[in-house]
Amino acid sequence: MRSIPPNSPGLDGDACYLAVKAHDARFDGSFFTAVTSTGIYCRPVCRVKVPKRENCRFYRHAAQAEAAGFRPCLRCRPELAPRAASWSTEDASRILALQAARLIDEPDAWPADGPGAARIAERLGVSDRHLRRIFESQFGVSPLQYLQTRRLLAAKQLIADTRLPMTQVALASGFASVRRFNAAFVGHYGLNPRAMRRAGAATGSRDDAAVEVRLGFRPPCDAAAMLAFFERRALGGVEAFDGEGPARRFARTLRIVHGGQAHEGWLQLRFDPIREQVLLRVGESLAAVLPTVIARVRAMLDLDAEPMAINSALHDAFPEGDGLRVPGTVDGFELAVRAVLGQQITVAAARTMGSRLVQAFGTPIATPIGGLDRLFPTPAAIAGASGDALGQLGIVRQRQAALLALARETVAGRLPLHAGADVPSTLAALQALPGIGDWTAQYIAMRALRWPDAFPSGDVALQKALGVGSAKAALEASQAWRPWRGYAVLRAWHAKPAAPSSSAVTPARARRNARPAAVSNAIVPAP
């Protein structure tokens, strides 16, 4: 093994070993166990025989285990683990390193050739040298090594779960060529990619038209609340549900643009609470961009949430919400359009209007799932729509202006709406558009940008739930919940749902806030 500290700084080896012995899913992705007698590293939930304590080394990140010369377990598959938290209230150096890791983990933040250390440093406003120093101090590996591990684990999942040709696996995982992919794979794992595929027990779905993968999450997770949230807002042609209880399935269409090429298809998912996993089926047309699909689904379902960190900050104030996650989206532009459409109307009315928009401007698509036959309209389609066409759908002029401005900024590439976007600049850009105020911008930041500290302080229902009478008082009350205020908002709405009506919103307040009158209550997943 290479020379590297036996455990990551800050990890208590004995405590980690107890979690491994208990197969405790709450720690899944928070650390990895490397076994010196086998040269393999595993997740805490791995069901193999627990190794001896003296043979265990513990690392916060898979990249650290691989830098020490350990290979990923073929049984528990470290690539399935939830990602570590990227938000922190700790020192600035740690925050900088975590934000750099978050950018590396976000495929939508970069062009097809992926990020480099220089690009990340420029984005964070520091020098390349300073970023490498801080990153290596925090993680024990360089940004390039961290990125390489991410690419290799993504490739490993494609090899195990799909029948994609190795050329497609290499490109989809972010490698510039098959030669570099093969060299990195053999160098890290000592095994040819094709040999690893032959060694795997599963080689993809039995359905030739779909790929099946598994995504891990940390409990507790209120899956029923999450699915109920999406079901209340499901748009005809784009989203569909079937089944009951734990077998309930959610399906939808989506479009992903990667390397200038549009990939269109469908996905279907269901929660497996016993194994703390989500079972995801993806249409074969999206297999080439599977890592991006997985990242977006993880964001949509908030699978990388850290319940222990969040609950330690929020449980005393909101004890009933420990399993709630903040619902995200697989398409930031789509989410922003839905937010605008929902201003000053009920959730049911917004759903009807959104379905009309899909039928009028969405692209037809064939899928094997009943009820899925449309893709959500592209930014270009909405940007090219006339006011009369939008007006015929029941969209008022103020909302028309907001939608057109939103679409045009997105088409021009000036408004990135994904988890890798810069939050302050995106909030400012959103509020500069006509018809979009602080509430709508914060709502988009919470769901599309995955900003856990989003806080619409001007929301009257939130103020009532918190027992305060002003936005200033709500902000003051929220300071103890940072950086998890978005989760506090969700719990407040869920614990004490208000029932505002559109008639309760005055025209002056509507112009100031440009926010849905019923969304405060409606954002909360139905019990």
Image (cartoon, rainbow, N blue to C red):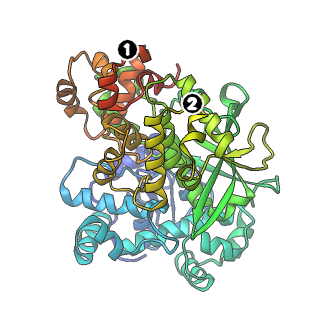
* Viewer-nearest residue: 298 or 149: 298
Q: How many marks?
A: 2
Name which residue lies at 36% across and 71% down: 143
**Relative to residue 466, is residue 381 depicted above or below?**
below
**Relative to residue 233, is residue 179 depicted above or below?**
below
| Residue 104 appears anywhere in the view | yes
Q: Choose mark 1 or mark 2, whichever is in front.
A: 2
Q: Of helix, strand and loop, which one carries label 1?
A: helix
* Viewer-nearest residue: 61 or 241: 241
Task: Using the numbered discs, state the Cα–Cα distance from disc 1 to disc 2 in whole angstroms.
Answer: 21 Å
Residue 394, image x, y percentages: 57, 30
Q: Residues within 10 Å of mark 2 (few under 14, many from 20)?
A: some
> Would residue 409 appear left or right of 224 to someone viewing this image?
left
Residue 63: quarter of image: bottom left
Query: Reading the chain from its start, which is encountered first: label 1 or label 2?
Result: 2
Name which residue lies at 41% across and 64% down: 104
> Would residue 464 appear left or right of 304 to someone viewing this image?
left
**Relative to residue 420, is residue 167 depicted above or below?**
below
List the residue tagged with mark 1: 504
Q: Residues within 10 Å of mark 1 (few under 14, many from 20)?
A: few
Amino acid marked by disc 2? Gly
Residue 523, image x, y percentages: 46, 27
Q: Of helix, strand and loop, which one carries label 2?
A: loop
Amino acid marked by disc 1? Ala
List the residue tagged with mark 2: 394
**Relative to residue 443, is residue 463 depicted above or below?**
above
Q: Dividing the image into 4 quarters, which one contains the N terminus?
A: bottom left
* Viewer-nearest residue: 43 or 461: 461
